[in-house]
Amino acid sequence: MRPPFSVAENYDQYFASQLYDQRYPGPNPSSLALIAREIPGRGGRILDFGCGNGRYTVPLLERTDATVIACDISRAAIDELSLRCARHVEMGRLRPVLGDLSVLVHTIGRDEGFDLVILMFGVLGHIFSRALRQETLATLRGMLRPGGRIIVTVPNAARRFFKRQAMARRLAREGHLEPGDIFYERIADNTVVKMYYHLYVLEEFVRELEQQGFRLIRVGAESVLPESSVVRSTPLYWIDRLLAAIMPLRCAYGFLAVAEVASEPERLTRPPHAPDSGLSG
């Protein structure tokens, strides 16, 4: 089961059209600050999986001493990132990788672990299908060094694409999609950019991380307002931070989790997590 279109080609159109930069001209400041706090004091080795054209990679290179491996399936995005950060590439602080998970696995040496892996603004939800999302999490877990962590964000089904969700239910019943999947479009320069998303409920997000061997440290709101608004308006960003502090987590536009590799006894004995009773935003 695959999307009826090339995801990589459509993302090439998305980045090349400049529509992505118009919608998301920079990182979410609160997410960026959280990532920076998770980087070890003497730098660290970071994987930005689904990096796009560097919305988080670029400021992390500028504000920290980290070394970054930045991986994306879009050639247009990787080419732009490589050009923007040519100095960091030459210095060895940035290694752009064009390709999917299988390419990354063959690019990274067996002794090259990561201190931190990030999958920002719904990258995990853009991976088709559930089996491949699970494989991705399990593989990335295996790339973390002892004590390393992962930061993942996913879209909240209760806040996104209601009409598309209604349309997708029929496709799910017919076996063309899995429950929670949708197809949608963005319009860029009169070109229709076709996209796939898996929309999460909170319990599913927590369960998926725990089933793939992670111990949750924190689950919160990536944002409450649409992220395209948060990153383009300073007043809306501060309003969003206030809302995130007082609104129930289930109202989030997207969920953000910080997790680390669970010990083997934890994996075997830990009961399913109850998000509303122990995790905060």
Image (cartoon, helix red, strand yellow):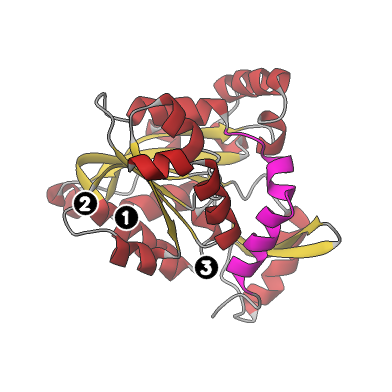
Marked residue nearer the N-terminal end (3 or 2): 2
Task: State how far apart marks 1 and 3 are (Cα).
Answer: 16 Å
Residue type at the position of mark 2: Glu
Q: Which residue occupies the foreground of this view, 141 or 101? A: 101
Residue 123: x and y in percent read: 52, 52
Q: Nearer the viewer, mark 1 or mark 3?
A: 1
Q: Which residue occupies the foreground of this view, 215 or 116? A: 116
Q: Residue 128 carries which label?
A: 3
Q: Which residue is drawn at 18% across and 47% down?
A: 266
Q: Does 121 sit left or right of 118 as displayed? A: right
Residue type at the position of mark 1: Leu
Residue 199 shows in this picture: no
Binning the other alpha carbons within 10 Å of mark 3 as few (below 14), some (14 to 19) or many (20 upward) gives some
Q: Mark 2 points at which residue?
A: 112
Residue type at the position of mark 3: Phe
Q: Which residue lies furthest to the right in this view?
A: 190
Q: What element carries label 2?
A: loop
Task: State how far apart marks 3 and 2 are (Cα).
Answer: 27 Å
Q: What element carries label 3?
A: loop
Binning the other alpha carbons within 10 Å of mark 1 as few (below 14), some (14 to 19) or many (20 upward) gives many
- Mark 3 near mark 2, Cβ–Cβ under 8 Å? no
Up/down of 207 relative to 253, above or below: below
Q: Does 255 sit left or right of 189 as displayed? A: left
Marked residue nearer the N-terminal end (2 or 1): 2
Q: Residue 140 carries which label?
A: 1
Residue 149: x and y in percent read: 30, 40
Q: Which residue is drawn at 84% across and 57% down?
A: 189
